[in-house]
Amino acid sequence: MKATFFRYLLVYTLLTLIIGCAGRSAPAPVVLLNSQVESGSEEYTASTYEVRPGDTLFAVAWFTGNDYQDIAKFNNISKPYTIFPGQKLRLTAPVSKPSTTKRSNVTTTRSTDPTSPPIAKRVIDQSKPQAYVEREQDVKAQKNTNVKKSTSIVKKAAPKTFPDRVEKWIWPAEGKLVGTFSKAESGNKGIDIAGARGSNVVAAASGKVVYSGNALRGYGRLIIIKHTDTFLSAYAYNETILVKEREWVYAGQKIATMGSSGTDSVKLHFEVRYRGKSLNPLRYLPKK
């Protein structure tokens, strides 16, 4: 009798454990070391986007993590960048077709026609004194030296392509952290830093300014910087904007002054996005 009771007890315990494990919530998402993006995140990876009612080209670029000027170029859209519901937009550059131009089989030969004009022979004027010739050579040499000096003092050219990853992140402003990131659908998609009006706003990482203006509702005067092919950062509510679109900036460079455009208090709203997916900026910024 006791043996039967213990068998039933053992079966009950095993069933309880199995049910408990099955009902346990899924583990926290795994963080990929190369991109620091949560596994299974809903980043936008499609190569096209179908325009919805109320969309603007600027909003589409921000949502998909692209440069609006690139999208306009890929789809032959000119200013004022009007798009229509149902329109399908390319988000990647169209593949260029190889050239089909054939080489001519006709070979060119040097003319032996006696009526062709003879090649003029260069005549050296020997009437110039030797001293004058030497002085003339000295002047030319000096000019060449000056040209070499002037060309050596050239600013470092802007990069032609984006790096594979962000080299470093820094805080975009000094002040008190008054708002933190939330994964909730209507939550804060970045962080908010309160500070003095007119204080510095700097680029959190090196990159290219892909947007500068106030066409995105709810962001006030906004700057968006592209750091890699997949990472963007945004700086909202600025008082003044100090950089232009297509300008390359470096980490720590002053790009704006803090203000309250689009909000009710002086602060910087800062976001980091990967393929349009909002990420917690505090995972990237150095700890204070």
Image: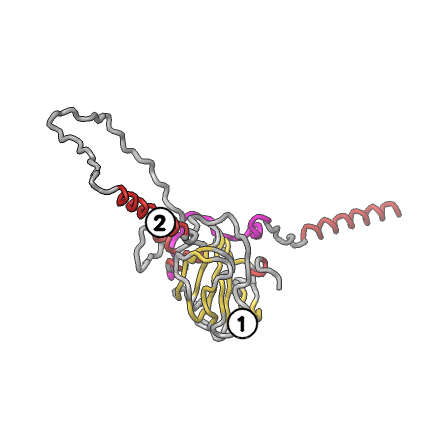
Hey, what amino acid is under mark 2? Answer: Val
- Indicate the position of residue 211 as horizontal and vertical percent values: 41, 60
In the image, 167: left or right of 154? right
Tell me if residue 149 comes above or below residue 268 in the rendering: above
Q: Is residue 102 visible?
A: yes
Residue that numbered label 1 is attached to: 194
- Indicate the position of residue 173 as horizontal and vertical percent values: 53, 67
Q: Magenta span covers which residues?
A: 33-55
Q: Is residue 272 visible?
A: no
Q: Quadrant of residue 95?
A: top left
* Disc 1 element: strand
* Disc nearest the viewer among 1 and 2: 2
Distance from the alpha carbon under mark 1 to that under mark 2: 51 Å
In the image, 75: left or right of 16? left
Q: Is residue 210 magenta?
A: no
Pointers 1 and 2 in contact (C-beta within 8 Å): no
Taking depth in this image into account, of 211 and 86 the one nearest to the observer is: 211
- Indicate the position of residue 234 as horizontal and vertical percent values: 47, 61
Most extreme residue toward the left, as rendered?
115
Residue that numbered label 2 is attached to: 147
Taking depth in this image into account, of 73 and 209 the one nearest to the observer is: 209
Q: Residue at x 17, y 33 (%)?
A: 120
Taking depth in this image into account, of 62 and 164 the one nearest to the observer is: 164
